[in-house]
Amino acid sequence: MPLTRPASREHDRQILRLAVPAFGALVAEPLFLLTDTVIVGRLPGPALGALGVASTVLSAVVGLCVFLAYGTTASVARQIGAGDTRRALRQGVDGLWLAAGTGLLIIAVVWPLAPWLVHLLGAEGELARLALTYLRISLLGVPSMLLVLAGTGVLRGMQDTVTPLLVSVGSFALNAVLNAVFVLVLGWGIAGSAWGTVLAQSLAAAVYLAMLFGRHRAPFRPDLAGIRSAGSAGVALVVRTVCLQAVLAVATALATRMGEAQIDAHTVASRIWTLLAFALDAIAIAGQAITGRTLGAGDVAGTRAATWRMVVWGIGSGVVLLLVVVALRPFTPALFDASPEATRELLAVLWVVAALQPIAGVVFVLDGVLIGAGDQRYLAWAGVLTTLAYLPAAVLVAASGGGLVALWLALGVWMAARLVTLGARAYGSRWLVTGA
């Protein structure tokens, strides 16, 4: 369906209204976590390494639960589009109860496994002891972290990305202050950093609960059928997330085996890729909210028009990011104090990183659109298929002794496979299920 200019401008306003605050919230987290790293880095001994080990475990566990935000956004937005705010809040509360239960389950499972997980990542002696201290204290804050994910999803579904931005900035700023006080003033060591994070996340969760049960007067009572439904939808998104993490883990493992210069360059390139993904993720979040709302309202034509407009935004953003990477490429190795060998590797890989940005722009947008449409089962199968497309390319790199550029070209095969599977689905109509 062709877009008229007024329609295009209206879609642009909707996208920007949702995407700009979402981008701010996405960027706030790594910036304030960097503050934690600086504070812990002032401690003697292997404290910084311990933070890295424990954070790896936490990031993997909490990352698998991102479905609490994505799935809740889609379900709430659909009910908002259908004009049923009460039912939207009901489904949002189901997501909150699922988050609380999942958080308690994670504590019960990971707590006894914590020593083994720390050693699995290679930590020994004092490093292992400090990592275990940080990990176990931080586990107490996991239910709050998951409540924040679900609460963020509820508000995004209600077309509000400004409040999550404010809560995100406030909680991470508080986290930085508490860490500075607990670690540098009170001398609690790495345990102080963990307690600061737990308290900041708990306060953020309390803000979301107060808003939903206070301002919006959401029903508090759990609905077992609704919780089961949310959990069922979440399983498919977990499969999708596991596939994403598996691809990145294989790439890191292969880069590690290539040598020190290669893994150093790969680490920097991966961090740059993640930073660039925040901008594209913001459009994807807008896609979740807009798609859920328009399909809930039964507006198929509006959904297609908004999807096409967001794809245009994704392509445009990808081209801009391509140019940014190319422009900053000569100066990037110096920012990370890369060795001469790592510099050569990184300068070569950044060409591939840049070239993949327009593809990533479309992939991220379509991923968000299909999540918003509640098409989680297809996304799970697509995740499996694209991972299977990537693995032969990765094996070929390892078997042929290919270098880091070849490894990133294999990641390009994966992104191309995602573009094909998501694009084919979006082009069809099976995902355009309307109504509440």
Image (cartoon, rainbow, N blue to C red):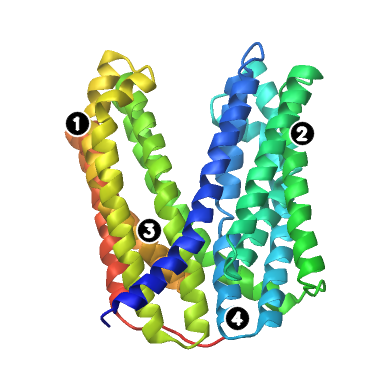
Seen in the image, is 415 located left or right of residue 378?
A: left
Residue 389 in view: no
Q: Please determine whether, in this image, residue 53 is positioned above or below residue 425.
A: above
Which of pointers 1 and 4 lies earlier in the amino acid sequence? 4
Which of pointers 4 and 2 lies earlier in the amino acid sequence? 4
Given residues 126 and 310, the one toward you in this image is 310
3D distance between C-alphas at marks 1 and 3 = 31 Å
Seen in the image, is 417 located left or right of residue 108?
A: left
Density class for disc 4 (Cα within 10 Å; few <14, some 14-19, many ≥20) is many
Residue 252 in view: yes
* SS of the residue under disc 3: helix
Q: Residue at x 28, y 61 (%)?
A: 419
* SS of the residue under disc 1: loop
Indicate the quadrant where residue 283 lies.
Answer: bottom left
Q: What amino acid is labelled 3 in the image? A: Phe
* SS of the residue under disc 4: helix
Q: Please determine whether, in this image, residue 233 is positioned above or below residue 406.
A: below
Mark 4 vs mark 2, foreground winner is: 4
Residue bearing the label numbered 1: 401
3D distance between C-alphas at marks 4 and 3 = 24 Å
* SS of the residue under disc 2: helix
Residue bearing the label numbered 2: 195
3D distance between C-alphas at marks 1 and 4 = 53 Å
Q: What amino acid is labelled 2 in the image? A: Trp
Indicate the quadrant where residue 54 lies.
Answer: top right
User: Residue 279, image x and y in percent?
Assistant: 42, 49
Disc marking residue 79: 4
3D distance between C-alphas at marks 2 and 1 = 46 Å
3D distance between C-alphas at marks 4 and 2 = 38 Å
Which of pointers 3 and 2 lies earlier in the amino acid sequence? 2
Residue farthest to the front? 6
Q: Residue at x 35, y 77 (%)?
A: 6
